[in-house]
Image (cartoon, rainbow, N blue to C red):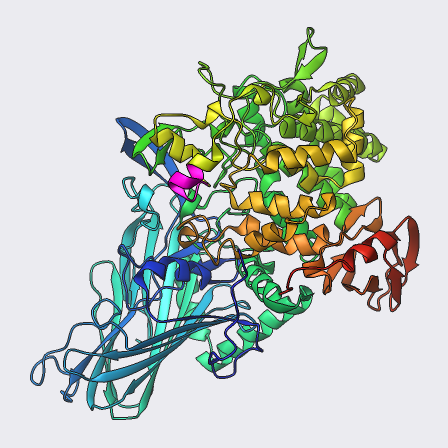
């Protein structure tokens, strides 16, 4: 897959960013509309709004949606004769709604006399003559220009600028400029807050209950210059307040018309040929989950009344974005750099500094759509390592989300007959297991049992993020309190889940599902789950070892308090030590097995299935629709074993295997990578990321192919329509981290910044900045066989940097130029494909 080519001749919006900072679509294509809505969504970490047409309501083509982080609601549905309960991230009232139509002759704003109003203009009622969307990443502004011709042949040009304010997380704004090209008369504009919305953004969920809002009331704010809407979620009882101020220039008649569930303001500006009329809409949004307010409606009305005009809002919004871009300096040349900026843009719209004040986790699909119901999975494993080195306060808040739900995870473990904490595979508002019991195969139309709740490896992902955060930040206070508590209980769960098998002389973890997800049972088995998933067992061994080390290093008063409160003693730690060295790691034919018995499964005729179906990423759905099961075959959605190479640097991975009694040398690892490379369908966007991370280290020529798939996964919608349901946040953040840590070999370990760059000719020169242990804006630049590191002036201690077997100290205000190992430079001199 090639990176999409830039369009050097495309027009850019007035006051636009530099080339390489815009994302553009031309023409109206109903089949592409959902994809564009996701990729043109705007947000600020508190809420986000999809890039939908303001004049269009939700239907089979358009999916407008506004989502507030952490705003969930639970509904019951009947599916396949069973009652099911699902918690969803709620689609809140549509603040964007603004529709328009020409009225022809001036009627003075009255509804009687003159020409009857035309139908509301939209791309579906009047196909646009021209249409262009331009997303300005640097400014965080979406520009839309469209030319309509109505039923009477009148031409109307529409230009809109949209923002969701990055400085004030409760404010959004829409500026619309109307130009009558060849006619005079009144234009009717309806600016609304629409509370009659539902969660309908994912087609396969539409059989399920999706109307989450109730008690919708509307009105006009005191003074008459704003309308408001209030409502609440039906079961979680979250109150929502929204207010909108709509203003216009010129000769305009105004009326307030509130319909059922909609607060509406009607404007009828007088249009003249060639004259532009501007309509500005400013919106404020609050919920009862917000801190420091008493009533969300009062807060919204007050905020919108105090908000400045659109030019001032745009200026402060742009300033806030400039600060974020400085904190995340990334200099990658060509199209790869342009795509990475888009990824970073969407990451920051979902998880911004505003997130640090919220009780939320990492939604797998961002705040960009309703896929996965807005749930929190293990995707933070691919997100937090990037945030640790730029916004550690956000990382800590996301870990706090997990800590607040530690008690619930302990309850879940106890209910399952286990000790410690068993975190859910899917989490939402309160940390209970939100994974569905049934899932729909859209190929067969059948509802099937969902056993993905057996993915207990999510606990290891949380422990890994705790440890990585501590190493990157040196935040001893967190590590000695909340971090130690989570590591303790997760380790306790793994030690209790491991059972001794005397016939094999090993501890085993039975009845789980790995990240692969394709294999949720053995062929013909009566129970779900597989045994001794290599990723699960090795990562559990790592958790146990890290927990032991952290607990024994705690300051004595803290250790005593924690031991007393959790009834922990040294004898239990001795058990952990034994389990951490005795867990079974399955092998077959000289490679690490994905799970025990994997090598005994049948081989799939890959060529036959590719020839028959083309795209076979979702082999599980294909085989089930044929009456077969993916459980019978040596195939993987994503290769679990290779995930170990993603988590752990080569030296640490080899050490882990030695601790478990195995030698995983470079030859065995390369053989293992090759084995799964031939048996993985990449049904997850994270699969290509893991391959892109691992392959350069084993010197595979096709590493760049997987890097390209990581970069283009969402923009090319390689998963076949899924991006339109929301971006893949883990893959986007992972692509950024691939440059930040994967290609630089950057590790934060033992108070030393360790670097081990990996050759990748197609991305051999790049620069970035990181925030490391109180040093803001440490700059790293790789190129020409050398690494330049600059530490900004401050009163902090020097940074210890390890590279190529030596350690140097770089003091604040100092720049050091370090030569890379000879093997790296030799690799860079090899002939490479065309670079981006």
Q: Which residues are magenta?
A: 609-616
Q: Is residue 653 above or below residue 419?
A: below
Using the image as rendered, state which of residue 476 and residue 799 is in the foreground.
799
Name the residue at 44% across, 63% down. Answer: 299
User: Which image quadrant is residue 477 in?
Assistant: top right
In magenta stretch: residue 613: yes
Using the image as rendered, state which of residue 272 and residue 171 is in the foreground.
272
User: Which image quadrant is residue 276 in?
Assistant: bottom left
In magenta stretch: residue 77: no
Residue furthest left as drawn: 113
Percent coordinates x, y for residue 173 in the rendering: 42, 72
Name the residue at 57% across, 40% down. Answer: 378
Q: Is residue 478 visible in the rendered structure shown here?
A: no
Residue furthest top as drawn: 503
Q: Is residue 273 above or below residue 804?
A: below
Percent coordinates x, y for residue 379 in the rendering: 56, 44
Q: Is residue 492 visible in the rendered structure shown here?
A: yes
Tell me: 58 left or right of 655: left
């Amino acid at each position: 897959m090639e990176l999409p080519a830039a369009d050097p001749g495309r027009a850019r919006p007035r006051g636009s960013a530099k080339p390489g900072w815009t994302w553009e679509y031309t023409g109206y294509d109903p089949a592409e509309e959902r994809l564009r809505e996701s990729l043109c969504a705007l947000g600020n970490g508190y809420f986000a709004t999809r890039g939908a047409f303001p004049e269009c309501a939700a239907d089979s083509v358009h999916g407008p949606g506004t989502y507030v982080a952490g705003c969930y609601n639970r509904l019951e549905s009947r599916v396949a004769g069973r009652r099911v309960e699902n918690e969803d991230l709620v689609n809140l009232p549509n603040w964007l709604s603004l529709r328009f139509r020409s009225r022809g002759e001036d009627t003075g704003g009255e509804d009687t006399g003159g020409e009857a109003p035309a139908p509301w203009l939209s791309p579906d009622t009047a196909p646009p003559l021209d249409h262009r969307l331009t997303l300005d990443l640097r400014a965080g502004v979406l520009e839309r220009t469209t030319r309509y011709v109505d039923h009477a042949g009148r031409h109307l040009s529409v230009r809109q600028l949209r923002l969701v304010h990055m400085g004030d997380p409760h404010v959004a704004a829409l500026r619309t400029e109307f130009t009558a090209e060849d006619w005079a008369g009144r234009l009717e504009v309806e600016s609304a807050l629409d509370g009659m919305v539902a969660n309908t953004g994912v087609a396969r969920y539409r059989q399920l209950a999706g109307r989450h809002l109730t008690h919708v009331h509307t009105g006009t704010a005191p003074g008459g210059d704003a309308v408001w809407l209030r409502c609440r979620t039906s079961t979680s009882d979250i109150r929502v307040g929204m207010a909108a101020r709509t203003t216009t220039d010129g000769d305009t008649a105004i009326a307030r018309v509130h319909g059922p569930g909609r607060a509406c303001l009607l404007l009828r500006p007088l249009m003249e040929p060639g004259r532009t009329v501007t309509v500005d809409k400013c919106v404020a949004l609050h919920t009862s989950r917000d801190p420091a307010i008493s009533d969300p409606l009062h807060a919204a009305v007050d905020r919108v009344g105090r908000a400045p005009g659109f030019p001032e809002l745009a200026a402060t919004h742009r300033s806030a974005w400039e600060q974020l871009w400085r904190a995340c300096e990334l200099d990658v040349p060509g199209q790869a750099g342009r795509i990475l900026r888009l990824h970073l843009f969407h990451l920051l719209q979902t998880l911004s500094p505003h997130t640090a004040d919220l009780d939320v986790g990492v939604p797998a699909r961002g705040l960009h759509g309703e896929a996965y119901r807005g749930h929190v999975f293990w995707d933070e494993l691919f997100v937090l390592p990037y945030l640790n080195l730029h916004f550690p306060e956000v990382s800590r808040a996301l870990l706090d989300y997990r800590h607040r739900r530690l008690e619930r995870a302990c309850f879940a473990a106890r209910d399952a007959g286990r000790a410690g904490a068993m975190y859910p595979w899917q989490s939402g508002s309160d940390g209970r297991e939100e994974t569905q019991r049934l899932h729909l195969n859209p190929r067969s139309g059948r509802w099937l049992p969902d056993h993905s709740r057996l993915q207990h490896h999510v606990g290891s992902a949380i422990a890994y993020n705790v440890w990585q955060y501590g190493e990157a930040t040196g935040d001893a206070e967190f590590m000695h309190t909340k971090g130690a508590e989570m590591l303790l209980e997760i380790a306790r769960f793994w030690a209790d889940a491991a059972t001794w098998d005397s016939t094999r002389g090993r501890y085993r973890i039975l009845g789980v599902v790995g990240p692969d997800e394709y294999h949720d049972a053995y062929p013909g088995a009566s129970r779900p789950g597989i045994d001794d998933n290599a990723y699960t067992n090795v990562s559990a061994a790592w958790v146990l070892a890290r927990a032991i080390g952290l607990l024994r290093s705690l300051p004595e008063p803290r250790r005593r308090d924690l031991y007393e409160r959790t009834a922990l003693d040294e004898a239990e730690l001795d058990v952990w030590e034994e389990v951490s060295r005795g867990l079974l790691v399955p092998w077959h034919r000289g490679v690490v097995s994905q799970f025990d018995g994997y090598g005994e499964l049948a081989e799939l005729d890959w060529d036959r299935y590719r020839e028959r179906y083309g795209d076979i990423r979702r082999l599980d759905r294909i085989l089930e629709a044929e009456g077969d099961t993916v459980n019978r075959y040596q195939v993987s959605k994503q290769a679990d074993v290779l995930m170990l190479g993603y988590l752990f640097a080569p030296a640490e991975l080899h050490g882990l295997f030695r601790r478990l009694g195995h030698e995983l040398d470079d030859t065995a690892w390369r053989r293992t990578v090759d084995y799964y490379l031939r048996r993985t369908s990449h049904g997850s966007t994270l699969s290509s990321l893991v391959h892109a991370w691992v392959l350069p280290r084993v010197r595979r020529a096709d590493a760049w192919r997987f890097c390209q798939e990581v970069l283009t996964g969402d923009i090319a919608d390689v998963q076949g329509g899924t991006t339109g349901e929301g971006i893949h946040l883990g893959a986007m953040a992972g692509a950024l981290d691939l440059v930040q840590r994967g290609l630089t070999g950057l590790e934060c370990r033992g108070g030393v910044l360790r670097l081990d760059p990996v050759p990748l000719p197609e991305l051999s020169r790049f620069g970035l900045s990181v925030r490391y242990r109180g040093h803001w804006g440490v700059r790293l630049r790789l190129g020409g066989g050398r690494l330049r590191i600059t530490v900004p002036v401050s009163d902090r201690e020097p940074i210890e940097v390890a590279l190529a077997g030596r350690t140097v100290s770089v003091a604040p205000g100092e720049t050091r130029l370090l030569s890379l190992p000879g093997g790296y430079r030799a690799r860079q001199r090899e002939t490479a494909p065309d670079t981006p």
